[in-house]
Amino acid sequence: MPDLIDNPEEYFRQFLPKRDQLLIELEEEARREEIPIVGPIVGELLHILASVTQARRILELGTATGYSTIFLARAFASTRGRLVTIDNDPDMAARAKINFHRAGLDHQIDILVGDSQEKLSEMDKSFDLVFLDIDKEYYASVLPHCHRLLKKGRLLIADNVGFKDADPFNRLIFKSSEWRSVNLFAFLPLHSPEKDGLCLALRL
Ligand SMILES: C[S@@+](CC[C@H](N)C(=O)[O-])C[C@H]1O[C@@H](n2cnc3c(N)ncnc32)[C@H](O)[C@@H]1O
């Protein structure tokens, strides 16, 4: 057995990625109002994955206050990047819009207000990366649209695949010949819940 770090959950809390004042404010607000944002570990992971894949067009399902959106949009290397994010809650969308302005990203983000399934069926322009974070019971039903809209060889990231409601999605993507996927069950400090799964899937 390798000699592992004692008390890893406490130990790794000291390595939370650095965030600016806006993101810290959004975390505090999310804690107060119980808004289920991804938190700094998944936020940073989204940023890194969007950067290394050089995503120019990103699609996000589930905006809330725009916390994860900001991590993703900050990965655009130039002002040419474009992110489309969808949320069915008009109040959340309005708050996100203000936060995009505060982050200086409003010119690169289009926020669509409405049901994901409905909005996706109206879309035909393709994307380099899709981040899935709506209510988990809808993951399986939006998957065909994600496949249609994501370019071949590009990445789908789904949060909260440790939720029971994500089970149909987990089974569907695992047996599908249209995706190559892996589930990571991990300790994610400041994510809610702190032990949860993430699915990374390559669009075949
Ligand atoms: C988990 S929160 C998103 C958190 C955000 N991605 C973050 O980490 O900062 C989920 C959001 O998806 C929205 N939502 C849930 N089901 C939806 C659906 N079917 N279509 C569009 N939006 C939906 C909710 O209103 C909520 O704001």
Image: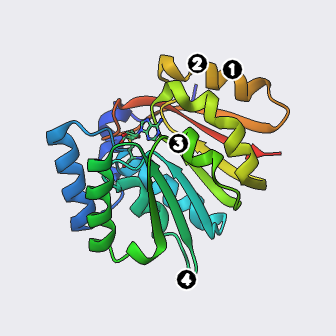
Quickly name the residue at label 4.
78
Decide which of tag 2 and tag 4 comes sooner along the chain: 4
| Relative image position of residue 59 (x, y in whole percent) | 57, 56
Quickly name the residue at label 1.
171
| Relative image position of residue 35 (x, y in whole percent) | 26, 40
Q: What residue type is disc 1 on? A: Arg
Q: Do the residues bearing badges 4 and 3 touch, measured as CB atoms within 8 Å?
A: no
| Relative image position of residue 155 (x, y in whole percent) | 68, 51
Quickly name the residue at label 2.
167
Q: Residues within 10 Å of mark 1 (few under 14, many from 20)?
A: few
- In this view, the residue in front, 133 or 188, is 133
Measure the alpha-carbon separation of dots 2 and 3. Answer: 19 Å
Q: Residues within 10 Å of mark 3 (few under 14, many from 20)?
A: many
Q: Is residue 105 left or right of residue 95?
A: right
Q: What residue type is disc 4 on? A: Ser
Decide which of tag 4 and tag 3 comes sooner along the chain: 4
Q: Do the residues bearing badges 1 and 2 touch, measured as CB atoms within 8 Å?
A: yes
Q: What residue type is disc 3 on? A: Ser
* Badge 4 element: loop
Ligand 1 has an atom within 8 Å of the beta carbon of the residue at disc 3: yes
Total marks shown come to 4
* Badge 1 element: helix
Ligand 1 has an atom within 8 Å of the beta carbon of the residue at disc 2: no
Q: Residues within 10 Å of mark 4 (few under 14, many from 20)?
A: few
- In this view, the residue in front, 195 or 149, is 149
| Image-quadrant location for residue 189 | top left
